[in-house]
Amino acid sequence: MAKPSSPPRQQAVEDFNACTSTSNVSRRAPKKRETTFREWAVNNQIGVSLTILLTLFAAHNLYPTVRSFTTPFFQLSYYQPETGLYSTGWDDAYYVFSTILALTAIRAMFIDWIFRPLARKAGLKKKASIRFAEQAWLFVYDLSVWSFGMYLWKNSNYWGDFKAIWYDWPKRELGMAKKWYILTQLSFWFQQIFVINIEAPRKDHYQMLTHHLITSTLVASAYIYRFYNVSNVVLCLMDVVDFLLPTAKIFKYFGYENLCNAAFVVFLITWLVARQILFPMLCWSIYKNVPDVMAYGCYSGTTAEMLTTNGYPDRFAHLFAPYFNIDGPICMNRTVKWIFLSFLLSLLVLNLLWFVMIVKIAIGFIRSGSTEDSRSDGEDEEDEESETEGPLRSKESSPVVSADGTGSDHAAPRISPTSSVRSRRGVLGDQADRKALLGRIGCEKPTNQ
């Protein structure tokens, strides 16, 4: 006997359940991706930085018993009332820490609250607005610190006389303005190490990380060894080009090709004068004037008086003694001189190589009317081409190249599809080789921002 079929109503319910079950599976919402620590840090730079600073500030004002601990976070330490100058010591590290937090918050606020809204209002889309904001921040910071550094240099006894740089060594005390300047610059470079590690890595991440570590080490070591004056001069010579390239890129983003090209020419000339003429003169001064001005020997860490003409009290320990005992003896000898000079000469060689690349790019632009977008950020060029619209879209390429060797924010100038194709067989070989090489032209402060 045949099995009775299901009642019509039951069959309808079964069919409905089957349909809805299949539909639910096919339309199931994708699992939400978890936020990584890197993304969390980027999104909370302002909040975290200000929370730490405000907590320290609240403790400083509400609990007088902890002020001996919190004061170094908010003001320069080791003030000497009898001279009106400042000495140096390990409490300076607290000030550097708080300045790193302040720079992190200020940078994020400028980018997120001022420059990106300005760029979006002008017509730039998301990625292009971020890059414009990074360049605008670089311009603001670099122009500010370079101007202040030049003020210190211009009003010093070593303006126009590199030999006079060494007259005060190893004097431990320095003015408030110069101490603030050097510690702020040191904080900036430490902050750049933080930035490139929390934001999306680019192809030159490890090169930039290495550069920032070396630069931070040099500035910190110069501070500990009391090379305050030479630090001022070196930073001014390096910083002067660091706001000129972002200036050209800003013009590029807004489509002002003639101004962009003019800014690049100024950048090229300034690089030549500052890094290829004045900087070698400074290196020669170190070679020539030490020990003529800075006599070899060991000096008191507190009074700066010479203790002995023997600059080698031991084999190696004296080289690191100032790092561990700021009040102890500090020695100058051929080894110290050549270690310091070797680092500067290495920087000089890199600057020369980068300058040759820049000149080749400029020549290539004059010959072909095109140049290469050199930022090795790993982002698709076609994707970048779709980022601009309206008056901000570039009509032609300009001789502006990204350059990273002194800093960390990455932002590539717009390049039209036609010029990008024309430049693939340009001055420095194929596109991959150029991206690897030109990313090292040391102008712009890299930050993956």
Image (spheres, rainbow, N blue to C red):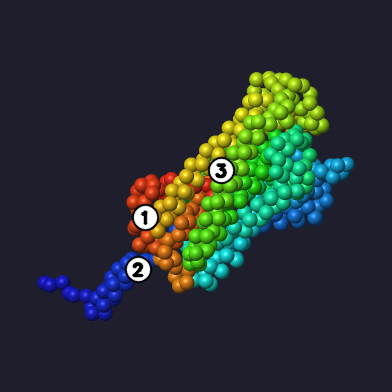
The residue to which callout 2 is attached is: 27
Where does residue 281 sit, x and y in percent of width and height?
62, 38
Which quadrant holds the N terminus? bottom left
Give the SS element for disc 1: helix
Among numbered discs 3 and 1, the one appearing first in the sequence: 3
- In the rendered structure, which amino acid carries the disc numbered 1? Ser
The residue to which callout 1 is attached is: 423
Give the SS element for disc 3: helix
- In the rendered structure, which amino acid carries the disc numbered 3? Gln
Where does residue 433 sit, x and y in percent of width and height?
38, 46
User: In the image, is residue 184 above or below residue 282?
Assistant: below
Picture disc at residue 275: none
Among numbered discs 2 and 3, the one appearing first in the sequence: 2
In the image: residue 140, left or right of residue 124? right
Give the SS element for disc 2: loop
- In the rendered structure, which amino acid carries the disc numbered 2? Arg
Res 180 visible: no
* Residue at (78, 47) in percent of width and height: 176
Label 2: few (<14), some (14–19) or many (≥20) C-alpha neighbours in 10 Å: few
Residue nearer the viewer, 140 or 192? 140
Where does residue 248 sit, x and y in percent of width and height?
53, 59
* Residue at (57, 35) in percent of width and height: 345
The residue to which callout 3 is attached is: 276
- Foreground mark, 2 or 3, reads 3
Specify the quadrant of the image occupied by residue 53.
bottom right
User: How far separated are the C-alphas under marks 2 and 3?
Assistant: 64 Å
